[in-house]
């Protein structure tokens, strides 16, 4: 007597079939589910990362807007000063001469060096800064005359101007001879002055030096 | 079907027929007999087994062919014992399929004793095996009635445990076979005999005499098994009431004789409805007794073993499949639930993202409406201010300096220079660290003392005093004397015309100062 396939109990056959189905289910169904879950996890991480980034960017934009309101008056002042524009040495010289006419100065001379350019980035755009060195030499009876003239020049030039170096040298003394010359209506000088100014302007966007 | 107690069937198979007994607890519910020569054969009992398809069937075989043999194994390695025992069984019963061994405790022997048992698969038993294999009721195998009835005689005789060796003989008339005698001592089977039943309608005294004769024959066997005169011997006879009465007149060679009807035996054993009060056959008593006990020994054919192994495998496989299915379903449910949670979280995250992006678009639209981009404003102002940081504070400086000079000193020459405007010694670019100091400046000046200072020391002291005053008013800028009215600084040569002690220079004294302005 032998055991044939027909002798295999139905319970055993069904159980084995169920186990095989379980194996297949695990092999295909569950692995597909796990793949989907992995993809979902990637999506979730991406979605979770993007929202804070957008929030952060929005906050930055709002801060920029707030700051823009604060910066605008200063910006407009700078723009009105002629800081953005081309440099015209003849116009500058004319302006210096106008300013010097209001002061009792003698032996005045000037030198405006060729302008230099320097590239820079503003708001991600390439711009050009122009810079010219102006040297002025004057003499006067009082050092205050020279100082006032220098102050006017620094404020009156279009754009931005700053002193690089300045010097005052006394060339005489207040004595009887000087007083006598003054009484005669002469205009003697007691002080020599020299100033070097850096005059800067920012070229308008797209303008060539 | 009893809802509270499980029932089981006990099938007693003998040479003359079979008795199916349904037992619930200690109560016999019903019994059905089928004769060996019945035309329908075992199928006659199929309908009764179908009354409770889940009730297991225990089979007690009470046929003549069963064989029992005592064997003592030599001392062997415990790991080899099973192999040695199997070899002994195979040697003892080479042609039988159903054979097994029962370990027994036996005094006076060295080694382990076994009762080797075999049950030849007769055509009748094969027929029963085929029948039972097709029934839905669980069927474990064949048990042997003499082995399963061990202990019953002691119970029925109500024999106290005494000193010395005690022997028990159980004699009963079975409808399925004949007179069955079971002799036991020390809880093991010594000998069993099955003899022909008396013809029907035999007078009770003749039956009693036959019982006596058969027992005396049996006694010769057990004497060879160690029984000696003087040993305690309890004989229990189960027979019809008339025979029980007749046995009183017989002189059985025993210490004590207990004659009971099957009905009385059932009562003594606590079993109900095992027989009618007038009943003669003890099969049902054995069946009910065995129903409530574990089988002592179960014999199986190899095919039965394989089928049972497969059935057992089926049970285990079913449990494994159920567990695996539950685990798979649980894992699937968990995974699906996790996926659903993740979908929800993604939806929530996407909603937050959409909200954030809407706010960003709104803010960017407002930003685009601005006349000038904030970055442009910020960087243009920075470029403008960068130049402002280099501007020299000349007017302010001069005004402050005037306070330090007072009325006794005057500036002859002054030069102020931005740090960035200073030339480096070799005309090279200034180092980055120095560039960072942009906004600093250096002032050099020549100061003339208006007060006459004819004494050299006085002139030097006046220069240092002026330096200190300048330091006070120009702090935190650094003020140093670069040339004293008299050249006494380290490295300077002091030379000139000799004068009166203390010096008598009437000309103006001058000193040079350097102010290094910090940004």
Image: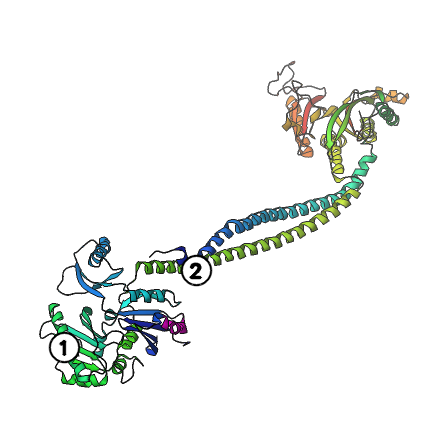
B44 is within the stretch colored magenta:
yes
Secondary structure found at label 1 = helix
Is any atom of residue B449 visible in this view?
Answer: no
Pick the front one: A202 or A138: A202
Is any atom of residue B463 visible in this view?
Answer: yes
Q: x%, y% of residue A3?
A: 36, 56
Secondary structure found at label 2 = helix
Q: Are marks 2 and 1 on the same chain?
A: no
Q: x%, y% of residue B448?
A: 72, 23
Q: Chain of mark 2?
A: A
Q: x%, y% of residue B99?
A: 25, 61
Give the extent of the magenta segment.
B43-54
Verify CB contact (< 8 Å) between mark 2 and mark 1: no
B401 is within the stretch colored magenta:
no
Q: Residues within 10 Å of mark 1 (few under 14, many from 20)?
A: few
**What residue sits right under mark 2 in the picture?**
A10
Pick the front one: B316 or A112: B316
Seen as rendered, the residue at the extreme front is B39
Pick the front one: B446 or B374: B374
Q: In the image, which is nearer the foreground, mark 2 or mark 1?
A: 1
Vertical relation: A42 (above or below) B190: above
Vertical relation: A177 (above or below) B315: above
Q: How is the image coloured?
A: rainbow
Q: Tell me the CA gap for discs 2 and 1.
A: 55 Å
Quadrant where the image shows the C terminus of chain B: top right
Instruction: Please identify the quarter of the rendering in which residue B157 is found.
Output: bottom left
Quadrant where the image shows the N terminus of chain B: bottom left
Give the total of numbered labels.
2
**What residue sits right under mark 1 in the picture?**
B213
Q: Residue at x 53, y 55 (%)?
A: B332
Seen as rendered, the residue at the extreme left is B229
Pick the front one: B42 or B168: B42
């Amino acid at each position: 007597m032998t055991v044939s396939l027909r002798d295999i109990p139905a319970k055993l056959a069904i159980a084995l079939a169920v186990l095989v189905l379980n194996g297949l289910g695990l092999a295909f169904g569950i692995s597909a589910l796990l793949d989907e879950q992995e993809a979902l996890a990637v999506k979730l991480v991406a979605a979770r990362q993007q929202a804070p980034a957008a929030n952060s960017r929005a906050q930055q934009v709002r801060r920029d807007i707030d700051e823009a309101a604060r910066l605008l008056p200063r910006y407009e002042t700078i723009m009105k000063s002629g800081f953005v524009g081309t440099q015209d040495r003849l116009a500058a010289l004319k302006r210096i001469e106008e300013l010097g006419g209001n002061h009792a100065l003698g032996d005045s001379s000037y030198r405006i060096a060729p302008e230099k350019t320097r590239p820079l980035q503003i708001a991600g755009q390439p711009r050009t800064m122009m810079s010219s060195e102006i040297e002025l030499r004057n003499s006067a009876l009082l050092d205050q005359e020279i100082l006032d003239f220098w102050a006017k020049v620094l404020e009156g030039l279009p754009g931005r101007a700053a002193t690089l170096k300045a010097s005052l040298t006394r060339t005489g003394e207040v004595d009887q001879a000087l007083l006598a010359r003054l009484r005669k209506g002469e205009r003697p000088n007691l002080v020599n002055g020299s100033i070097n100014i850096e005059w800067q302007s920012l070229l308008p966007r797209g303008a060539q030096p | 079907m009893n809802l509270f107690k499980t029932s089981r069937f006990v099938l007693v198979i003998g040479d003359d027929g079979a008795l199916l007994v349904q037992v619930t607890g200690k109560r016999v519910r019903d019994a059905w007999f089928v004769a060996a020569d019945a035309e329908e054969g075992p199928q006659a009992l199929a309908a009764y087994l179908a009354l409770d398809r889940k009730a297991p069937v225990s089979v007690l075989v009470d046929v003549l062919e069963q064989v029992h043999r005592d064997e003592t194994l030599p001392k062997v390695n415990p790991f080899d014992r099973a192999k040695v025992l199997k070899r002994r069984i195979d040697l003892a019963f080479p042609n039988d399929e159903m054979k097994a061994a029962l370990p027994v405790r036996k005094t006076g022997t060295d080694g382990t004793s076994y009762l080797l048992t075999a049950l030849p698969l007769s055509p009748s038993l094969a027929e029963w095996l085929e029948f039972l294999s097709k029934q839905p009721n669980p069927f474990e195998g064949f048990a042997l009635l003499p082995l399963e009835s061990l202990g019953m005689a002691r119970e029925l005789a109500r024999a106290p445990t005494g000193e010395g060796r005690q022997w028990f003989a159980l004699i009963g008339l079975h409808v399925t076979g004949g007179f069955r005698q079971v002799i036991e001592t020390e809880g093991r089977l010594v000998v069993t005999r099955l003899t022909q039943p008396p013809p029907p309608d035999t007078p009770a005294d003749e039956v009693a005499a036959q019982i006596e004769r058969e027992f005396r024959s049996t006694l010769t066997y057990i004497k060879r098994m160690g029984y000696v005169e003087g040993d305690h011997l309890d004989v229990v006879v189960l027979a019809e009431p008339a025979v029980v009465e007749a046995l009183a007149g017989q002189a059985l060679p025993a210490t004590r004789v207990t004659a009971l009807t099957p009905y009385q035996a059932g009562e003594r054993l606590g079993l109900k409805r095992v027989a009618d009060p007038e009943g003669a056959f003890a099969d049902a008593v054995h069946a009910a007794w065995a129903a409530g006990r574990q089988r002592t020994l179960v014999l199986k054919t190899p095919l039965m073993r394989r089928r049972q192994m497969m059935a057992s495998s089926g049970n285990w496989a079913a449990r494994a499949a159920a567990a695996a299915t539950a685990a798979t379903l649980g894992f699937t449910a968990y995974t699906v639930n996790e996926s659903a949670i993740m979908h929800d979280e993604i939806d929530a995250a996407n909603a937050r993202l959409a909200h954030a992006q809407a706010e960003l678009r709104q803010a960017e639209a407002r930003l685009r409406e601005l006349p000038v981009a904030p970055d442009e404003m910020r960087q243009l102002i920075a470029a403008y201010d960068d130049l402002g940081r280099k501007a020299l504070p000349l007017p302010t400086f001069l005004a402050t300096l005037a306070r330090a000079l007072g009325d006794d000193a005057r500036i002859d020459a002054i030069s102020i220079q931005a740090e960035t405007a200073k030339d480096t010694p070799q005309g090279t670019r200034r180092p980055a660290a120095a560039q960072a100091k942009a906004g600093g400046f250096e002032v050099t000046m020549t100061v003339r003392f208006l007060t006459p200072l004819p004494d050299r020391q006085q002139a030097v002291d006046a220069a240092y005093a002026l330096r200190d005053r300048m330091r006070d008013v120009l702090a935190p800028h650094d003020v140093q004397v670069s040339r004293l009215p008299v050249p006494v600084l380290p490295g300077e040569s002091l030379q000139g015309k000799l004068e009166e002690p203390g010096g008598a220079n009437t000309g103006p004294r001058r000193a040079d100062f350097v102010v290094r302005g910090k940004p």
